[in-house]
Every structure is written in structure tokens, then in C-alpha cells.
Image (cartoon, coloured by chain):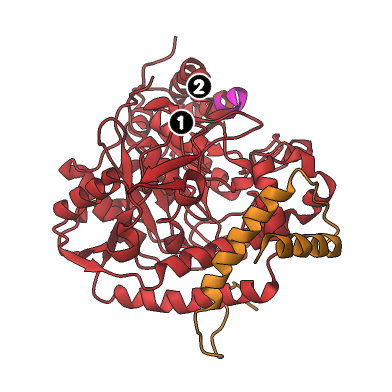
Amino acid sequence: MAADHLDNYIDAVSKALALSVEEAWRPAVRANLDVSLRLARLVDEFPLPDETEPASVYTA
Amino acid sequence: MSANTDGLSAQQIAQAVTDRKLSALDAAEAALARIAKHDRVLNSFTDVTADRARATAKAIDAKIAAGEKVGPLAGVPFAVKNLFDVKGLATRAGSKINRDLAPSSRDATLIERMEAAGAVLVGALNMGEYAYDFTGENVHDGPSRNPHDPSRMSGGSSGGSGSAVGGALVPIALGSDTNGSIRVPSSFCGVFGLKPTYGRLSRARTFPFVAGLDHLGPLARNVGDLALAYDAMQGQDADDAACTTRPVEPVTSLLANGADGLRAAVAGGYFQKNVFPEALEAVSRIAKALDATMTVELPEAARARAAAYVITTTEGASLHLDRLRKQPNDFDPAVRDRLIAGAMVPAPLVDRAQKFRRWYRAQVLELFKSVDVIIAPATPCIAPKLGQVNFVLDGVELPVRANIGIHTQPISFIGLPVVAVPVPLQPMPIGVQIIAAPWREDIALRVAHALERMGVAAAPTPRGL
């Protein structure tokens, strides 16, 4: 995602989550988000069957 | 003047205490003296619980004097990463924020079990803030330092645990491992570390990071001590929802079985890329000793590491969301900025990471039909210098922090048991992961023990003290 798009996204989500992002932190937050989304994309593009269960732990 | 227990293993201390050749109090005083002497350099302790240690030790000595039975860790000093609840202390988890918490009213389950076996808690250990760290650095408490070269990192996030055991201040320390936080400091500090199967050891009354990935385990200077501590801590616990209900499976008596008949293979592909020659040399020595000529490929390991990263950053963000809203300036800025970014990752991507985890687990478990242990680097490099930001590998400049855990993350992601064994290279040691199938800690520990007996794996005497 281009930097300005990420900045718009950061503005929108931080507002929705009531998280303040000071201007001084923005470059680091943007860089971290860029890494997170890049790694998430690596997972996202891997095809999995619809029936795949998530691995989160819950026992009734 | 306390007895000189320097260099004694936990097993030797327990034997001497049980045989009345050494008092538990003298063993505790000796540990406290080592801490007083060397921790000015190492900075591995954030709290020294001297009064408690003396009281616990005296109680053990009284039991022995009364002819009562004492446990297999009688009089053994140990310490815990400061995310463990210690009665009377605020559980700081490496943070500034948590220092305002009320003092804990009860010890963590694993501390209770260690002390029930006769061990003596001497303090709480430095760590990376909220365990989101691979360096052992801490902006609030200062870095814990490497016992072989104090200008280098201890590794994180259980940095104080690695530093205290590597520096031989205590024979055993407990740490936590979400993505590598026991195995990385074990590698950098040259000690043995056990990250058990996910769910094996109770996490009750410890400060969490990522519920689905958090493990606790011991670090020690030899495999016998590691097994002794592990055996003392096993058992179900209703206070940890993920803790197994499997029966206790003691390993200490199995160590002597050795590695004969076990099939070992080296992890190829992803695990042989982006590594320094020292890591390859260490893996090669271990493979040679185990006669491991086969290579196995953990499928999609890079994606597994990516998925672990995504789950970690998002679950970590969820855990700390209120603190990020109310006290953002009280965080380590580097941790804060990672967590804020984690809060912004869309939910479907996290769900896909959890689904990928299920797929990857099934693929890797297939490998264990043809091998018993898989050998992989614990870290791609020896301990970097404190504050080091980048390193150059194959002519490419790479960020240190982001790359320290690349070989541990794809393993803990699916909860496999691992013993990190130290290979005593010069000038700095480096660790190798001995990875087994779920619930087969016994196999990983047997192999580690065999390597120790062969002299291939060993915790070096602290070179920087």
C-alpha cells in the first residue's frame, strides 16, 4: 500500500479504535503496519480449503 | 561467609543438601553473593528476594534436620522472568506501566511447583517489555547483558534468564517463549533451554502475551538440571485453560537411554537461508554427532513465520489496547508502535493466519513419521552488539530485531517441543534447536543429553565475568 494510503488508513482506524497516533510516532507505526500487512499478504495469498478450521484454542 | 557452590549443578546442590554436606541456607547465600558480585555487570535481576530465599532455605534445612523427606531440587536456587507472579511483588513483565499493579497475592503455579520440589526462589529477572522482544534490551531497566561479552545482547525476551544462567548466578531460571523467547537467549548466552509442547506446563499467574502461542519453560547449564526442573513443574492445572490433562510424563530417568535408534534430520530450505556461518557450523557439528545425513523441508516455513507474526502483533495489540489508549507514552516506544500497528491489521487476515496454522501443523506432523528429531538453527547469528540495528549477510543489510527469531517462530507456531542446545564456538556460543513431535519432550531431551555427553553441546564457563 502506498504511504499516503496507509496514512489515510491509520487515520481512519485509529479514530475507529479511539487510539491516538501522535505525528512523531506515525513513521514507525506506518513502517510496522507495512511489515504486518506484507507478512499477512503472504498468508492471505496461500489457498486453503473452505473447510479449514482455525487453530485458536477453545474447549467446551 | 557462605559455602562455595560456584559451578555446582542443581543436581549436585540437591544431592549435597539432601546428604547434609551443604545447607540450603549456605546454597542460597552463595547464590545471593554471586548475584551481588556479578549482577552489576549482567543486570539480569530486577528483584532479589533475599529474605524470602533465606526463609525458604531455613525451612528446608529444618525439614532435613527433622528427618523429613525433601524434594529432588532441595536447596537449589532459581529465579524467574519478571512476568511470573511472585507473592509480594508487582508483576512488571518488563514494563513501566505494570509497576503500578498491586503486589501479587500468590506465586505462579510453576514457582509453587519448583518450591514444592525444594527449590529456593532468589529473585525475578529482567526481560524485554511485555515479552515483545528478541534482544534482551529494556528501556526502563537497562539491558540484561551477555555473560560471555557484556557488550553484547543477552537475547530476548527472557534475557535476564539467559544472562543469569549463562553467568552461573543460578543453576536454573524460568522463562517464557511465544516466538523464541527461551531459545534465543539460550542461544546467545550459551545455555540449554526447553520450550515444551504448547499446553504442557501451566502458565497460571504469569503475565500473558499471546494466549495461543505462550509457553513457559526452564533454562539450565546442563540437560540433567533442565529435566529435573521440567519434571518438577509438570501436571495439570485448572487455572490455565490451555494446560494439558495428560498424565505427568517424567523424563529424568529416560535421559540415560541416549539417542541410539532415534532418527535425526536437518531442516533444509528456509532454515539454511539468511544464516551466518557460525549458525551453519553449529548445525553441522550437531548433525555430524547424530549421524544425521537426511534433510527435511518444513513446507511453507516462511509463511508460517509470517502467520506467527500476524497472530502475535494482533493478539498482543488486543491485550494492550486499553493501555495503548490511556498510557501510550509509558510504553517502550518501539513496542508501542508495533502494537498500534498490530491493532490495525484487518480481522480476516488474522483468521486466515489461524487457518494456515492448522494446515501447517498437519504438514509438519507428517514429517515426524519418518524422523524423530529435526535439527535447525536457534538463531541466525551469535549475539549481536547491544544497540546494534542492522547486520550484513551475503552483502545485504538486514534489520537485527526482525531477523533474530526467524528460525524459532515457525516451530513454536505449532507448539512443538524444542531443546535449544549450546554449541560452544569461539568467541561466542550459539544454539541449535532439537525439535521433536508434540508431547515428545523426552526425545528432544534424550538427544540433547547425548550431545552433551559427546561434548558437542555444552554451556561454556562465563567468559565475560
Q: Write down which chain is painted red.
A: B
Q: Evaluate whether residue B72 shows in this view.
A: no
Relative image position of residue B122 (x, y in whole percent): 54, 29
Relative image position of residue B424 (x, y in whole percent): 26, 36
Residue drawn at the location 73% of the way across and 50% of the way down: A26
Relative image position of residue B454 (x, y in whole percent): 16, 44
Left or right side of B253 for A44? right
Which residue is disc 1 drawn over? B164
Q: CA distance from mark 1 to mark 2?
A: 8 Å
Amino acid type of the residue that numbered disc 1 sits on in the rendered structure: Ala
Residues marked 1 and 2, same chain: yes
Q: Is residue B101 above or below residue B362?
A: above
Q: Chain of mark 1?
A: B
Q: Secondary structure at mark 1?
A: helix
Over which residues does the magenta segment extend? B46-53
Q: Quadrant of residue B106?
A: top right
Residue B325 inside the magenta-drawn segment? no
Q: Earlier in the sequence, mark 1 or mark 2?
A: 2
The numbered mark at residue B94 is none
Drawn colour of chain A? orange
Which residue is disc 2 drawn over? B39
Residue drawn at the location 47% of the way across and 44% of the way down: B400
Left or right side of B264 for A2? right
Q: Nearer the viewer, residue B103 or B419?
A: B419
